[in-house]
Image (cartoon, helix red, strand yellow):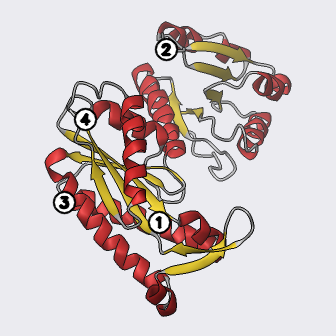
Amino acid sequence: MATAIRITVIGPTQTVSSTLVIRLQSKGYQVSALSNLAATMGVIYSDPPDILIVDLSQPLPEMNTVIRKIKEDCYFSSIPVLGLIGEHDDSIDWEDTALDDFIVVPINYPELFCRISLSLCRIQRVFDNNPLTRLPGNTSVHQAIEKALGHPMAVCYVDINNFKPYNDMYGFSRGDEVLRMIGRIMFNAVKGSGGGFTGHIGGDDFVFIVPMEKAEAVCTTIIGHFTALVADIFDEREKDLGYYIATNRKGQEEKFPLMGIAIAVVPTDSARMNHFGKVAQVAAELKKQAKRSGESCYVVDQRK
């Protein structure tokens, strides 16, 4: 059973004891009500809600202080804050009042419920997307793979060979640029094939999902563009030698091959691909095979 969304309503006594709380509870939300503004932050710190609804329909300077404290706290700033405002109130200083959304009173409850759902979905998207590449992150990747199971699709895990020593040698800014570029290369290749899903698990681990019949062509496109990218980020001497010198995990200098890309292609229409964990397991095995080649390549799971 899914955990009930927890909502805290903050405002004068007549607000927190009103129909609002009852209507929220009728939709299955777990609701707590606070009318003592002085105690608000202590309550939120001890039991953070999933969403806050604050009554701004009456002039209460303390309310802005509460909102500001929440939004200035790095841990609680992600909590969506919905404000209740008067129908003809144009006096709100929006720069000083850090709301994520608002609802006009008297409350249109179907609209309020929609705005609550939208706020929660919005914050999930914001936190799921990788901040560097802006591609969907782990939660979206997991959901996309689960959705592909049982269909003639290919889940393709992408890993950059020898990325860590490059990142250590040339610095995070150049490493980040490589990650941004591979994210863009993948996204464009998938889009150019007719569409699909592109996600960033984290670090140099990516995933894309396309129809099985297009997977190898997309892999070939990504490898081709990544090879061109590598040619631009190393100097001529390193390209001629085919390696660069960096410090390994033991603190010793070592020759590392120029970066390559390994792609594990896992078809999802076989009966044995019945859950996310199995796809990840097979992909890990295939990536090892791809990496052993020493060159950019892809490996397709041929087992039925």
Disc 3 is placed on an element classified as helix
Q: State which quarter of the image contains the C terminus.
A: top left
Residue 280 place in picture, x, y as percent: 41, 37
Is residue 178 at least partly visible in the picture? yes
Q: Is residue 199 visible?
A: no
Give the amino acid type for the residue marked by disc 3 in the picture: Ala
Mark 3–mark 1 Cα distance, whole angstroms, equals 22 Å
**Residue at the image position 27 percent from the left and 43 percent from the top:** 301
Which residue is drawn at the image coordinates 54% and 9% (left, top)? 25
The picture places residue 273, in percent across and down from the top left corner, at 29, 29
**Foreground label between 4 and 1:** 4
Q: Residue at x 55, y 73 (%)?
A: 256
Mark 3 sits on what residue? 217
Please identify, in this view, whether the residue under mark 4 or under mark 2 is nearer the observer: 4
- For mark 4, what is the residue? 268
Residue 180 is tagged as: 1
| N-term mark: 2 or 1 | 2
Residue appearing at x 34%, y 66% in the figure: 185
- Amino acid found under the numbered disc labelled 1: Arg
Q: Is residue 56 left or right of residue 110?
A: right
Pick whichever of labels 4 and 1 is earlier in the sequence: 1
Q: Secondary structure at mark 1?
A: helix
| Number of residues whose C-alpha sits closer than 10 Å to that of mark 3, classed few (under 14), some (14–19) or many (20 or more) | some
Q: Nearer the viewer, residue 37 or 216?
A: 216
Q: Is residue 243 above or below residue 34?
A: below
Name the kind of residue labelled 4 in the image: Thr
**Left/right of residue 43 with respect to residue 206 in the rendered view:** right
**Which mark is in front, 2 or 3?**
3
Which residue has dot 2 on it?
A: 2
